[in-house]
Image: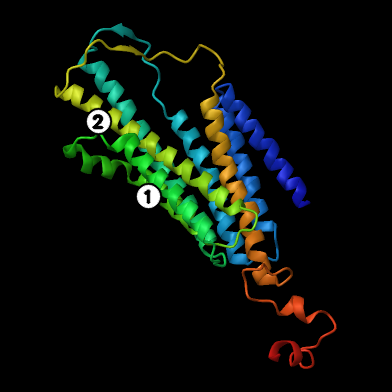
Amino acid sequence: MRLSKVWLAFGVTGALAVAAATVSATEVSLRCAAVAFVVLAWQAAAGARSAPRRLRWLLAAGCVLFAAVPVVQLAAIADRPADAGWFGYGPPDTAALTALLDAARRAVRWEQVSAGVRLGAVVLLAGAVHRLPRVHRRGRAVATVAGAVVLGVGIVADRWTGIDLDRLVPALRGTWPGLLAAAAGIAALVLAGRRADRRGLVVAGAALVAVGAAVTQSDLTGSWLSAAALADTICGTTQPAIMVSTATDSAAGASLDLEPALMTAVLLAGPALLVAGVPRAATPPEGGEAAPPESGEAAPPEGGEAAPPESGGAEPQDG
């Protein structure tokens, strides 16, 4: 199977995942995304044979874990409780709130598992980026550090600025997989700024992976805070005003929703750019075919094919 066909298969399955997310076909989108990541893992393992084997297997293992994330999300959808079928105006009773709280906590547990799997995937991809040869490019390093700082500030400002101090420690305990995944994504972005990457694919892929991890952390934190607020309502800490709650099935049909489609595209594009860029960045220093200007290994181009090591080494190198 040719590698170009592998990329074609990834493009088709990824496009189907994005299109399904656009029309709110969530389960179809998740299945297509899982298949796309499996194809990407095959490309990482079989492509760029001149790249180090350990580097390729790090990429492949990360893509396999990325494929496991939509599988976990499909299991979470299947584990949702049956719809209660009630519709009420005004403050609901304790039984209704308790049922909602149980469903919210179950959803949070599934999101924690999904964030934990994504954490492992991001760590593996960050490890692959870390194994690339280092270069000194101050402009790119400053840009990636600035982007990492902006992303970190956005994470803090999104969910954590208005949180109560007495809820801070429980929130950290409940959302630590997402926080660590976001931290690993930020670390991968910072590492990419000082690695050999002439085409910018590694930096772009690391940036998209970091954004995807940050969004995962934001979703997990929002779900945990909603469940905590619902628990406070049941305990009488807060009094709900007029609540309109529905537990009916989503019978409205498909509708265009660009936000999940954009997020699906980001989640697919980040690892794909890393799979395309990391072997390219690692191959020149290892194979010696076309050594980049920043690496000092200039012996193969200067020696040429007619200069043996013992004869051509005296004149050009000593002079």
Number of marks in the rendered image = 2
Q: Is residue 242 left or right of residue 146?
A: left
User: Looking at this view, is 180 or 98 the one in front?
Assistant: 180
Q: Amino acid at mark 1?
A: Leu
Q: Is residue 214 left or right of residue 49?
A: left
Q: Amino acid at mark 2?
A: Ala
Tell me the CA gap for discs 2 and 1. 21 Å
Query: Residue 284, position in %: x, y?
Result: 68, 67
Corner quadrant of residue 165: top left
Query: Residue 24, position in %: x, y?
Result: 55, 22
Label placed on residue 180: 1
Quick one: label 1, few (<14), some, or many (20+) residues within 10 Å?
Answer: many
Q: Which residue is mark 2?
A: 228
Whether residue 123 can be seen here: no
Q: Which residue is at 55% across, 44% downward?
A: 67
Please tell me which of labels 2 and 1 falls first in the chain.
1
Query: Residue 46, position in %: x, y?
Result: 69, 57
Whether residue 161 can be seen here: yes
Q: Which residue is at 20% across, 17% downward?
A: 94
Q: Residue furthest left?
A: 236
| Circle 1: element type | helix
